[in-house]
Image (spheres, rainbow, N blue to C red):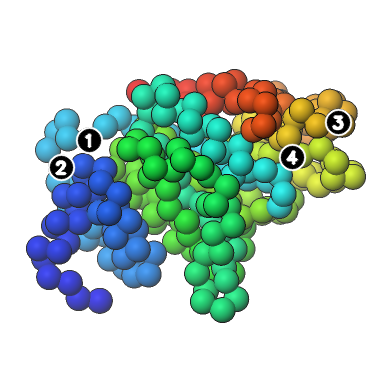
Amino acid sequence: MSMPEPVWRAWIAQARRWEPAGIARLLSVIDNWPQRWPQIEHELLQAPAGAVGPHTRVVGVTGPPGAGKSTLLDKLLGNLVARGLRVAVLVVDPSSPFSGGAVLGDRTRIGEVAHHPRVFIRSVASRGANGGLSDSTATMLGLLRALRFDLVIVESVGAGQSEVAIAGLTDFRVVLCPPGLGDDVQALKAGILEIADVLVISKGDLPGSEVTESEMRSALRLRRTGGCPAVIRASAASGLGVNELADLMAARTR
């Protein structure tokens, strides 16, 4: 891929100002041509001192399909921007079997907050990669870290118990489990339970959520040494637990 230098510089200048068009174009470049990332990174890091924000905290959000990740994320984003935070979101969606692009099912569940001036959201096609992420996720995170958003949230494809790739790319992990999955402990046992910094019983105002919370607390005590992660019941519909979860996600930003 060959592009004139003025085009690169214009996109990088836009990205430094957190303009969505510039960020989106640079993400597209490194998604499709990851070998361009070192050049982009070098240019970004030439920003004058004080031109970028504080250290970026990267939060991973994962869990089984149907756990309500995107719906809860919509409420969390509203809470986070109300605190004055600048937030970027990478939503990893299943790939279309026809175009290879992102299906965008998760993106459609994020409402008007997606258009907030301090929110940037990008959907990424998994392209068949294992682990609930895409092969380009790490490089795209590199760009968003370099831009120094206050918080970057990575939402994985609906993940099973062995899909823990998100742990190696994030500073803080949120694992969702809804009630009513049958054997709740089996649904999230082993690896994916052990990466959680906070376990969220999503749709926590539904019947059975208290039972799921109790089962998960018991499972965590059995499986984890050195202390258990926080356990929160949360509901996008009622707002239950949203502020508490946002507190944990935003800790140590700014």
**Along the polypeptide, which appears first: circle 3 or circle 1?**
1
Amino acid type, label 3: Pro
Question: In this rendering, which labeled residue sits more in front, label 3 or label 4?
Answer: 3
Q: Residue furthest front?
A: 112
Q: Residues within 10 Å of mark 4 (few under 14, many from 20)?
A: many
Residue at label 2?
Answer: 47
Between residue 160 and residue 182, name the one nearer to us. 182
The secondary element bearing badge 4 is classed as strand
For residue 180, what is the image quadrant?
Answer: top right
Disc 1/disc 2 C-alpha distance (Å): 7 Å
Question: In this rendering, which labeled residue sits more in front, label 3 or label 2?
Answer: 3
Residue at label 3?
Answer: 207
**Along the polypeptide, which appears first: circle 4 or circle 1?**
1
- Residue 84 is left or right of residue 170, and the answer is left
Q: Residue furthest bottom?
A: 98
Disc 3/disc 2 C-alpha distance (Å): 52 Å
x, y (%) of residue 194?
Answer: 70, 39
- Residue 17 is left or right of residue 114, and the answer is left
- Does the residue at mark 1 contact the one at mark 2 (Cβ under 8 Å)? yes
- Does the residue at mark 3 contact the one at mark 4 (Cβ under 8 Å)? no
**Along the polypeptide, which appears first: circle 2 or circle 4?**
2
Q: Residue at x 80, y 32 (%)?
A: 206
Amino acid type, label 1: Val
- Residue 118 is left or right of residue 205, and the answer is left
Disc 3/disc 1 C-alpha distance (Å): 46 Å
Amino acid type, label 4: Cys
Residue at label 4?
Answer: 177
Is residue 229 visible in the rendered image? The answer is no
